[in-house]
Amino acid sequence: MDITAISIGLLIGAIIGTTIGYFILKKLQSKQEKELLYKAKIQAENIKKDKIIQAKEKFLELKEQHEKTINNRERKIQEKEFHFKQRENNFNKKNDEFRKREIGIKEIEEKLEGQIDGVRKKEEELISSQKKQIEILEKVSGFSADEARDQLMETLQQEAKTKAMATLKEIKEEAVMNANKEAKKILIQTIQRVAAEQTIENAVSVFNIESDDIKGRIIGREGRNIRSLEAATGVEIIVDNTPEAIILSCFDPVRREIARLSLHQLVTDGRIHPARIEEVVAKTQKSIKDEIVEVGKRTCIDLGIHGLHPELMKMVGRMKFRSSYGQNLLQHSREVANLCATMASELGLNPKVAKRAGLLHDIGKVPEDEPELPHAILGMKLAEKYGEKKNVCNAIGAHHDEIEMSSMISPIVQICDAISGARPGARREIIEAYIQRIKELENTALSFDGVTKAYAIQAGRELRVFVESEKVGDKRADELAFEISEKIESEMTYPGQVKITVIREKRAVSYAK
């Protein structure tokens, strides 16, 4: 019984001890879990604080980069505004100079009017002297007063009219020569420096596409592609509602050509993204540079010009992408060079030097930078810089009368430049309008009595008029030339000036049998 009781007691004690140990163990586990949870929370808070600090630092870094980008853009905008203001100020200065010269021209016109008034007074004095002479002749001649008066008046009027017309013509020619020379010089300088290079024909190229769907691919997502193209080429790309066409706008024709060729390659390839755009533009730029050098070398070889400086050769190559008044500059320069060589050979001068000057006479139109100088002066300075001879430099600088001519080559280059520009169809003039102007010139001359034939020659710069010798005398021929010129001036619009030549011929034919 005692053993049983002891066993039972031990069993009960074991059960109680196990239970108490279980509760004690559970309490210890719960306490450890709380400590681990507390530590995990503290660690999580520390990680959170670190991430917040990193995010703030990243935000500050991005904000700083964004501010730098904005500041750079603002600086560029300010620089462009400053450059624009400088150009505007230069234009205002030139405009003021033009107004001053215009006032000078008006003063010349006033002087001319004064001279005309003097001529009229002299004519009046002549008429009064004629009256006195008539009275004397009436007494001496024995003619009746009416007969003598009619005869004398007719003679004296014709003489006075001829002399007055000759005097008036001389005065007018002198005034027109001076006034037109100054006015044309001012206008040419103004147009050349300000407006000529800003025309649509010289600033815009059109890139044709097969369909308007390609426009979206060229623009790209959020405009990334078109921005990359503009940044890489320096050309403004205009994508508007024009069907199947994209407009490339830039003053530099070489950059426009690079942009056009790059677009063509990208559209043909089909892969259009910023990285690909930069790669294609870089390859196209290298290709264009190589082409410029090759065109310059080939042009010099074709013309037989040797020893030309590499930089001048590059400028000759750049002429391929430049136009002047609708005429390709390289083609124009080659034409002038060949004409100069021919004319120099005929005159017994050095044709190689003349050809060299003819080829380089417009290099002032193609430098990459555009200083505010007339292209003739700029071309002369470039030629001097790269070791060209004095006669060649003088011919370049004097082909628009910017400086005084000091060599026999200079007038040849000037003449050949005018010949190339005056060739029908060479420059921007519709052939129908040109033919119509020629016909109007001829019809104007044919409208006068006594004119049998009229021919417009020299691209409409000269009018040859043939008259009947029986109807038109020598004095009447002078009057007729003057009247035709007056009618052309009042009724027609034409470039430059028109020379009127009246030709009177008397032929006596007989046959000996």
Image: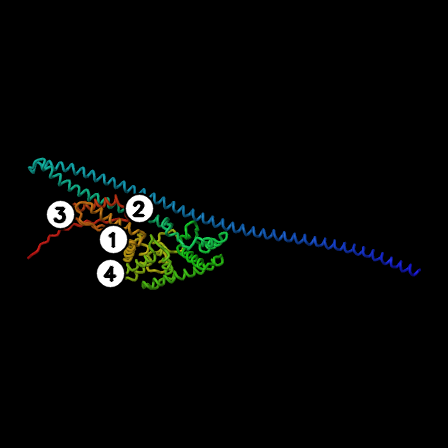
How many neighbours does mark 3 have within 10 angstroms: few (below 14), some (14-19), or many (20 or more)?
A: few
Q: Residue 458 carries which label?
A: 1
At label 2, which amino acid type do we have? Answer: Ala
At label 3, which amino acid type do we have? Answer: Glu
Q: How far is the residue under mark 1 from the one under mark 2?
A: 24 Å
Which x, y percent locates residue 280?
Answer: 45, 59
Label pair 3/2, CB-CB below 8 angstroms: no
According to the picture, the residue beneath numbered tag 4 turns out to be: 346
Judge left or right: residue 377 versus residue 228.
left
Q: Which residue lies furthest to the right in this view?
A: 1
For marks 1 and 2, the one nearer the N-term is: 2
At label 1, which amino acid type do we have? Answer: Gln
Q: How far is the residue under mark 3 from the one under mark 4?
A: 41 Å
Q: Which mark is residue 183?
A: 2
According to the picture, the residue beneath numbered tag 3 turns out to be: 470
Label pair 1/2, CB-CB below 8 angstroms: no
For marks 1 and 3, the one nearer the N-term is: 1
Q: Is residue 96 above or below residue 415?
A: above
Quarter placement of the C terminus: bottom left
Q: Is residue 436 visible?
A: yes
How many neighbours does mark 1 have within 10 angstroms: few (below 14), some (14-19), or many (20 or more)?
A: few
**SS label for mark 4:** helix
Q: How far is the residue under mark 3 from the one under mark 2?
A: 42 Å
How many neighbours does mark 4 have within 10 angstroms: few (below 14), some (14-19), or many (20 or more)?
A: few
Residue found at x 67% / y 53%: 46
Tell me the quarter of the picture where residue 133 sits: top left
Q: Nearer the viewer, residue 320 or 94?
A: 320
How many neighbours does mark 2 have within 10 angstroms: few (below 14), some (14-19), or many (20 or more)?
A: some
Q: How far is the residue under mark 1 from the one under mark 4?
A: 21 Å
